[in-house]
Image (cartoon, rainbow, N blue to C red):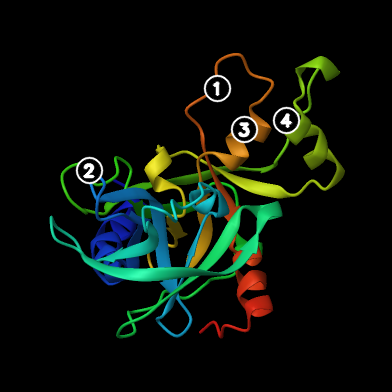
Amino acid sequence: MSALDSAYAASLPDTVSAVKPSILGVGTVQADRVPAVQLRGTAFVVGDGLHAITNAHVLERPLNAKGEEYLAVFVGSGSRPQVRRARRVAIDPEHDLAVLGFGGAPLPALRLGNSDRVREGQSIAFMGFPIGAVLGLYPATARGIVSAITPIVTPAADARQLNAEAIRRLRTPYEVFQLDATAYPGNSGSPVFDPASGRVLAVVNMVFVKSTKEAVLAHPSGISYAIPGRYARALLRRAGIPNR
């Protein structure tokens, strides 16, 4: 193990312990449904401790108003997490980001780092709920590197291979982080953070980017992607939420 690897391995456990209290489950609650709780993705606490960032697509499915279904965040870990009602505060459909607000006592907030300084080959980690809440709410950490900084759309050899979404994104392209680390749909909204400082550099995205970037592939790869944190910072600013 190199000196660099040793430093990485030594700092990550401490950072995981610091980040973990800020990781939330995002889903819905409906009393007459079995199960009553459905987890849709991951979020992380920011700002004043009463707001969180997740992916916009996590919130896309409409609520069953007749069944009194409501949006919620799940706090803590284990088989009996604390349930807090949540509300949409701000949405950025272009970058698939959303800000949620919730009540109760403020939670520890993560700080956003400078995603403009992220380099290819840089070590990262992310934390979330890759297999949902089948066995309870237990956030899992993955580690890897930023393998590429790449446009959100992969050019196609034949225009017939492009879907409508990919064509629309070609008009307003931007770069995303390609990660050499395995994420799953439940990781949508997970913070990608610096292993040493815990500062958030990006937001894992497992649906929105892949449906655009890999639309031309007959067999989508297992590559993971993340939305750079600059867009989350901008969304918080537009929503008037202070970012530490």
Q: Are marks 4 and 2 in contact (CB under 8 Å)?
A: no
Between the C-alphas of marks 4 and 3, the distance is: 11 Å
Q: Residue at x 26, y 46 (%)?
A: 33
Residue 158 in view of the camera:
no
Circle 4 Cα neighbour tier, 10 Å, few/some/many (<14 / 14–19 / ≥20)? some
User: Which of the two marks, 2 or 3, is nearer to us in this view?
Assistant: 2
Under circle 1, the secondary element is: loop
Please identify the quadrant where the N terminus is shown.
Answer: top left
Residue corresponding to mark 4:
154
Sooner in the amino-acid sequence: mark 4 or mark 1: 4
Q: Is residue 78 left or right of residue 204?
A: left
Under circle 2, the secondary element is: loop
Closest to the observer, 88 or 10: 88
Please say if 117 is above or below 94: below
Residue corresponding to mark 3:
211
Between the C-alphas of marks 2 and 1, the distance is: 32 Å
| Whole-percent x, y for residue 59 in the image | 51, 53
Q: Residue at x 63, y 84 (%)?
A: 240
Q: Residue furthest left?
A: 79
| Whole-percent x, y for residue 88 in the image | 53, 67
Residue corresponding to mark 1:
220
Quadrant in which residue 119 is drawn? bottom right
Closest to the observer, 43 or 146: 43
Quadrant in which residue 27 is drawn? bottom left
Residue corresponding to mark 2:
34
Circle 2 Cα neighbour tier, 10 Å, few/some/many (<14 / 14–19 / ≥20)? few
User: Which of the two marks, 1 or 3, is nearer to us in this view?
Assistant: 3
